[in-house]
């Protein structure tokens, strides 16, 4: 694997990950780009003890361009994109419209019980393939392994940046989810705080350890493997199952069969075993209704400096589609109270996903 670092016209970092050692990444970005925007504002919500990022510059980001104008495709004669090379395997670069960055601006305090601080951190785009019409489900095992290598590389490097407390790798797929670019890609957020969801899960894990002496995530996995009824797929290293208290119509969690804190801790066999299982799960989702399933795929990794002994690397995959022509909207109960009501019995969702064996 070859790793090449270069820079875009406005100074943003670009990293290529190639399977070939002779890959030439000397192409230069000659575009004339505007100055990079200042970091977002972080505003503190004292009622929920959470930080909210306010990033007004993101209003102008590229929104669903036609394929011929996709900024994530390789550059071509007469048309330069965010990727200067004319082809690539996996490409990672700093987001042009980031939610977090180290370009500090001027921030006024809002008064009241809130406070403002710069949204320091980093946001990166990960292009899974140069093929615009492809998808993660269509990637070869070797390509998935290269994406995993890129995720682990970026997790390790971003965790070393000053003030970064958590690194989050994820993919949003489908217009229904709210994507702004249809090219197969994901993102990485390096947060300046531990996210609310992670704080809650680690607090639950700590209480569980105090009560039982065990690891909550490991015991959830063991119980699901023993029950079997919600398991979708498994191999020697990974298990995919619908959680018993699934919030979304079709939700699958993919757990490594041993506890590690983050993607950096995966060994070669575990990386190789992930691709075939995960792409199989994605194809099952696509086969349910005969349409490309919109989804969010979210890696849960340990924070940089806390809870690493409690955390358990796993991926959470969910779709808002509940039927061929129906979506799950977050209405009053979910949006206002955070109290989910699921329309699909988790055991039935698991049965439907398993039934795609004969697809």
Image (spheres, rainbow, N blue to C red):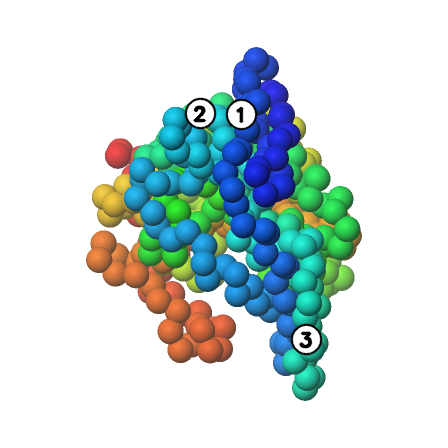
Task: Identify residue for label 2.
Answer: 86
Label 2, label 3: how many angstroms apart (C-alpha)?
44 Å
Task: Identify residue for label 3.
Answer: 108
Note whether 41 is above or below 101 in the view shown: below
Q: Can residue 209 be seen? A: yes
Which one is in front, 282 or 116? 116
Q: Residue furthest top?
A: 22
Query: What element does badge 2 sit on?
Result: loop
**Relative to 21, is 292 on the left or the right?**
left
Q: Earlier in the sequence, mark 1 or mark 2?
A: 1
**Would you say the residues marked 1 and 2 are in contact, meaning their CB atoms lie under 8 Å apart?**
yes
**Which residue is depicted at the point 52% across and 61% down?**
57
Task: Identify residue for label 1.
Answer: 27
Where residue 355 appears, as percent x and y from the top left, is 29, 41
- Quadrant (top left, top right, bottom left, bottom right) of the N terminus: top right
Query: What element does badge 1 sit on?
Result: loop
**Relative to 200, is 160 on the left or the right?**
right
Q: Earlier in the sequence, mark 2 or mark 3?
A: 2
């Amino acid at each position: 694997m070859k790793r090449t670092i270069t820079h875009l016209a406005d100074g943003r970092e670009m990293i290529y990950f190639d399977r070939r050692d002779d890959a030439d990444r000397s192409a230069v970005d000659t575009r004339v780009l505007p100055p990079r925007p200042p970091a977002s504002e972080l505003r503190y919500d004292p009622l929920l003890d959470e930080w909210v990022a306010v990033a007004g510059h993101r209003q102008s980001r590229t929104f669903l361009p036609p394929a011929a104008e996709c900024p994530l495709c390789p550059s071509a004669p007469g048309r330069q994109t965010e990727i200067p090379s004319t082809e690539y395997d996996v490409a990672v670069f700093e987001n042009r419209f980031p939610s977090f960055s180290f370009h500090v601006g001027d921030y006024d305090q809002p008064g009241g019980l809130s406070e403002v601080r710069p949204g320091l951190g980093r946001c990166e785009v990960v292009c899974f393939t140069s093929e615009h019409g492809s998808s993660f489900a269509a990637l070869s095992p070797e390509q998935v392994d290269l994406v995993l290598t890129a995720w682990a590389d970026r997790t390790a490097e971003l965790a070393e940046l000053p003030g970064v407390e958590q690194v989050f790798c994820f993919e949003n797929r489908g217009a229904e989810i709210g994507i702004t670019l249809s090219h197969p890609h994901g993102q990485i957020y390096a947060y300046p705080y531990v996210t609310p969801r992670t704080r809650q899960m680690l607090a639950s894990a700590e209480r569980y350890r105090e009560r039982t002496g065990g690891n909550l995530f490991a015991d959830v996995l063991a119980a699901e493997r023993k029950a079997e009824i919600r398991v979708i797929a498994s191999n020697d290293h990974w298990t995919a199952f619908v959680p018993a208290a699934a919030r979304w119509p079709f939700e699958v969690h993919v757990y490594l069969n041993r506890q590690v804190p983050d993607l950096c801790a995966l060994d070669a066999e575990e990386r190789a075993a992930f691709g075939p299982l995960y792409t199989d799960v994605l194809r099952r989702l696509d086969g349910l209704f005969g349409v490309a399933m919109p989804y969010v795929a979210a890696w849960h990794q340990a924070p940089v400096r806390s809870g690493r002994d409690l955390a358990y690397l796993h991926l959470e995959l969910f779709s808002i589609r509940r039927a061929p022509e129906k979506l799950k909207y977050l209405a009053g109960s979910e949006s206002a109270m955070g109290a989910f009501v699921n329309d699909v019995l988790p055991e039935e969702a698991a049965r439907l996903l398993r039934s795609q064996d004969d697809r």
